[in-house]
Image (cartoon, helix red, strand yellow):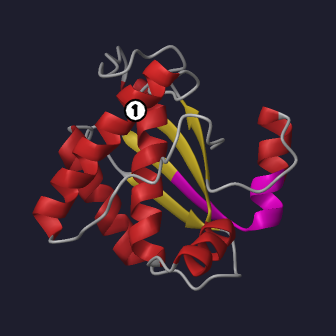
Amino acid sequence: MGVVLRNLQKVVPLRRARLRRDVDILRHILGIQKFDLGIVCVDNKRIRQINHIYRKKNLATDVLSFPFYEDLRPGKLPCPLHRDELNLGDIFLGVEFVMQQCHEDSLDLHGTLTAITAHGICHLLGYRHETEEEWTEMLQKEGYILSEYNRLTGSRLEPLMKRCTQDR
């Protein structure tokens, strides 16, 4: 199965091959290679529109996830019955928003996109951060994913979730 990676924004130069490679590594770490996954890179205008429509928040953000399996329990992989159910869902990356955050915090864009993609994949796999307990569980999962990613690539990425009340 594969990853569909679309870059629908023109604001930020993006190395899609690197992002695709990083997503493949994340999929390997999580054992989800047999599942399809969509990743769409968008600008602030588009991510704000999507956020407003689906979350009633009229502001840009870094990532929005739309899981194929809406009631998936964290830590459990889906058990599809048919080939067309081998889909985890779609992740929208607010690349322009992420670039602005990277400038403010002196972070590397591509490393940050990888960390944010890991966050988005966690959401596709049923993880949430609406309560302190959920936040802790998701932070631990992201920490595990990124530590494995770092081990495999020699990187030094960390989860970007800072506190439970952070609105992602």
Q: Is residue 135 visible?
A: yes
Q: Quadrant of residue 57?
A: top right
**Residue under pointer 1:** 138
For the N terminus, give its image quadrant: top left
Residue positioned 37% across, 19% down in the render: 82
Q: Position of residue 56 (x, y in %)?
A: 85, 35
Judge whether residue 42 is colored magenta.
yes
Residue in the picture at 41% in, 37% down: 122
Is residue 145 depicted above or below 123 in this figure?
A: below
Q: Residue furthest bottom?
A: 13
Q: Nearer the viewer, residue 32 or 107?
A: 107
164 shown above or below 92? above
Residue neighbourhood size for the residue with mark 1, other residues' Cα within 10 Å, grouped as few (<14), some (14–19), many (≥20)? many
Q: Which residues are magenta?
A: 39-48
Numbered label tally: 1
125 within the magenta span = no
**Residue 151 in the figure: left or right of residue 79:** left
Which residue is drawn at the image coordinates 59% and 25% (left, top)?
Answer: 130
- Left or right placement of residue 67 versus residue 112 in this view: right
Say which quadrant the C terminus sits in.
top right
- Give the residue displayed 16% in from the left and 52% down from the top: 148
Quarter of the rendering containing residue 66: top right
The percent position of residue 87, horizontal first and vertical second, equals 43, 33
Label 1 secondary element? helix
* 67 sits to left or right of 48: left
* Callout 1 amino acid: Met
Measuring from the top left, give residue 59's x and y in whole percent: 83, 52
Q: Is residue 40 above or below residue 141?
A: below
- Residue 151: horizontal and vertical position, in percent? 11, 60
- Tell me if I can see residue 86 in this picture: no
The reply, left or right, for residue 125 in relation to residue 97 is: left
Front position in the image: 95 or 150: 150
